[in-house]
Amino acid sequence: MSYLTTLTTTATDEYFDIPSIVQALRDVRLTSLEHRHRSNKPPKLPSRKSLQQVVDGLSAALFPNRLGALGLKEEGVDYFVGFTLDTTLRELNTQVQLELRYSADTEHNKKPSAEAALNKVRIFAQILPTIRQLIDTDLDAAFEGDPAARSLDEVLVCYPGITAIIHYRLAHELHRLGLPLIARIISELAHSATGIDIHPGAAIGEGFFIDHGTGVVIGETAVIGRHVRLYQAVTLGAKRFPSDEQGHLIKGSARHPILEDNVVIYAGATILGRITIGAGSVIGGNVWLTRSVPPNSQITQAKTQEKAVNETAQ
């Protein structure tokens, strides 16, 4: 007996006419699959729920004494890290296989081998100590840059900027390994939790600090140097989106800002386009900036308004 037939015999049908809704949704779904050339069984996608568990496991392995199991004793730390890595990397391998199969189906390539997924996860696993070292520099930057921070432990477990950066550091390496979908899902998990949107394709140097953080947006091709500090609601975005001859957006072009070392950008500033903010510059709150500035610049709303008036007068 089919599901539709079963539903027609239930009292639910009297109230909601569920069988006709199910049929209509099926028709729309099949039309959509046909439009996307997915009439055959569509490939499964990596799971957000599983990837959240992967991020939690990796975070616990990176910081076992603070993000690991409760009551963990010193003599058991290495065992905990090893066990956590084993289970987490196995699950990551499953998710990588799903992405590779999905990409192969989308691009009409041959079916990827299980070994291809395993090799990517092996490479990623070897990078984990380097990721931990980078995150340590981010923790130091947050502690040194915020007078309200009482300890590195507080920064690690309480600061949304650090949560977003941990997700980014993991996602960025997966993005570099040719796993953009998994990387993007991990970034969006942080976005949902913190309100901070960092594209995993962005390149961010050591000692990165996002204070408060809500509303920060960092685009795919942004390049951020060492020891850069951003405050809430800062946007590093694109000024325009070039199209090809058919009117389709050109993907992957360099369209986001470059921030050199030791730049500080205060709350609400919007930096757009492939421009360069010179090393040591300070960009004031709510500034709208679409032009490059030399090193050690001090840009405020008043200065940008004065420049606009002078250009209009000329």
Image (tube, grey):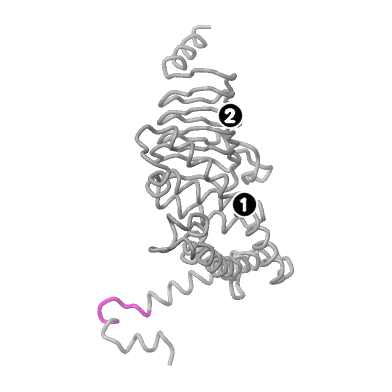
Count neighbours of disc 2 (C-alpha within 10 A) and say few if under 14, some if 14 to 19, many if 20 or more: many
Quarter of the rendering occupied by the N terminus: bottom left
Q: Position of residue 187 (x, y in %)?
A: 50, 52
The quarter of the displayed image where residue 296 is located: top right
Q: Which residue is mark 1?
A: 173
Residue 15 as seen in the image, left or right of residue 190: left
Disc 2: which residue: 261
Left or right of 35 in this view: 22: left
Mark positioned earlier in the residue sequence (2 or 1): 1
Q: Nearer the viewer, residue 99 or 241?
A: 99
Image x and y of residue 285, in percent: 41, 26
Q: Is residue 210 magenta-colored? A: no
Question: Horizontal and vertical percent for residue 222?
Answer: 58, 38
Residue 90, position in %: x, y? 58, 70
Front-lying residue, 173 or 110: 173
> What span is in magenta?
13-19
User: Nearest the camera: 40 or 221?
Assistant: 221
Q: Secondary structure at mark 1?
A: helix
Residue found 60% across the figure and 28% down from its top: 275
Q: Main secondary structure of the magenta part?
A: helix
Mark 1 surroundings within 10 Å by alpha-carbon count, few (fewer than 14), some (14 through 19), many (20 or more)? many
Q: Amino acid at mark 2?
A: Asp
- Looking at the image, the residue that sits furthest to the front is 75
Q: Residue furthest right?
A: 110
